[in-house]
């Protein structure tokens, strides 16, 4: 079976092998008189020790990172819950404002319809404005009794909390 080896791989292997052989031979000339095998065993032991040290350092850093995450997690969870609560409250307030605007519009329409049913008030231009259940009546009223009747019509509409009667009595 033939193997195709990339030419650059062969050169790399040749350089690596030559370097290893030179190191082994240089080791043999040392004064400590260790054999090549002993020197290789020493190098392997040092490499294994360095790997153990690297593993211990990595595990320590990972534990520190986990501790920091665990320390910050409750605050992050609390911030998320607070944000959700504020968003929920804002949604409720917006819903209430929309409901209030619809209720005010309904009250205004009901008061205007009630005024239109009154023969003495129906022909007049009475402005009805409602804000938060408070109805304001503006415009002319032919008599004091008609002014009082307009206020009573507005007061009897469901949802009205107060009536500000600013109608002006004008004799025709």
Image (cartoon, grey):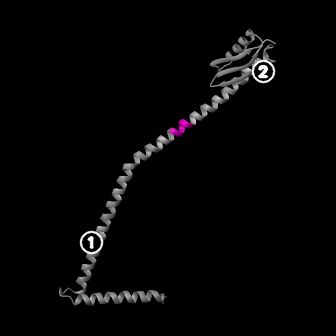
User: Is residue 89 located in the magenta-colored stretch of the structure?
Assistant: yes
Which circle, 2 or 1, is nearer the viewer? 2
Q: Is residue 33 above or below residue 66?
A: below
Q: Position of residue 11 (x, y in %)?
A: 43, 89
Q: Is residue 154 magenta?
A: no
Task: Check the image and report above or below for 7 versus 90.
Answer: below
Secondary structure type for disc 1: helix
Question: Residue 45: horizontal and vertical position, in percent?
Answer: 26, 75
For the point 78% across and 21% down, the residue is: 125
Residue where numbered disc 2 is placed:
125
Question: Residue 17 occupies which quadrant of the picture?
Answer: bottom left
**Residues rendered magenta in the picture:** 86-90
Image point 29% across, 87% down: which residue?
A: 23
Is the magenta region chiefly helix, strand or loop? helix
Instruction: Label 2, secondary structure: give it.
Output: loop
- Residue 28 picture quarter: bottom left
In this rendered view, identify the residue nearer to me: 113 or 122. Answer: 122
Horizontal side of 7 relative to 129 (left or right) equals: left
- Residue 161 percent location from the top left of the image: 62, 19
Q: Going by the image, does 18 lie left or right of 163?
A: left
| Residue shown at 48% from the left, 87% from the top | 6
Q: How many neighbours does mark 1 have within 10 angstroms: few (below 14), some (14-19), or many (20 or more)?
A: few
Residue closest to the far top: 145
Q: Which residue is mark 1?
A: 49
Q: Residue at x 33, y 88 (%)?
A: 19
């Amino acid at each position: 079976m033939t193997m195709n080896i990339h030419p650059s791989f062969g050169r790399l292997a040749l350089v690596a092998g030559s370097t290893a052989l030179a190191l082994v031979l240089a080791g043999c000339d040392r004064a400590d008189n260790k054999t090549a095998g002993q020197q290789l065993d020493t190098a392997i032991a040092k490499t294994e020790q360095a790997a153990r040290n690297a593993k211990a350092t990595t595990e320590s850093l990972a534990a520190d990172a986990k501790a920091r995450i665990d320390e910050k997690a409750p605050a992050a969870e609390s911030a998320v819950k607070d944000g959700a609560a504020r968003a929920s409250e804002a949604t409720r307030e917006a819903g209430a404002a929309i409901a209030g605007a619809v209720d005010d519009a309904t009250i205004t329409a009901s008061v205007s319809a009630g005024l239109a049913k009154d023969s003495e008030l129906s022909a007049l231009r009475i402005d009805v404005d409602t804000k938060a259940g408070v109805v304001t009546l503006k415009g002319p009223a032919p008599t004091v009794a008609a002014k009082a009747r307009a206020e009573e019509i507005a007061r009897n509409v469901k949802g009205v909390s107060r009536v500000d009667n600013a109608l002006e009595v004008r004799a025709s």
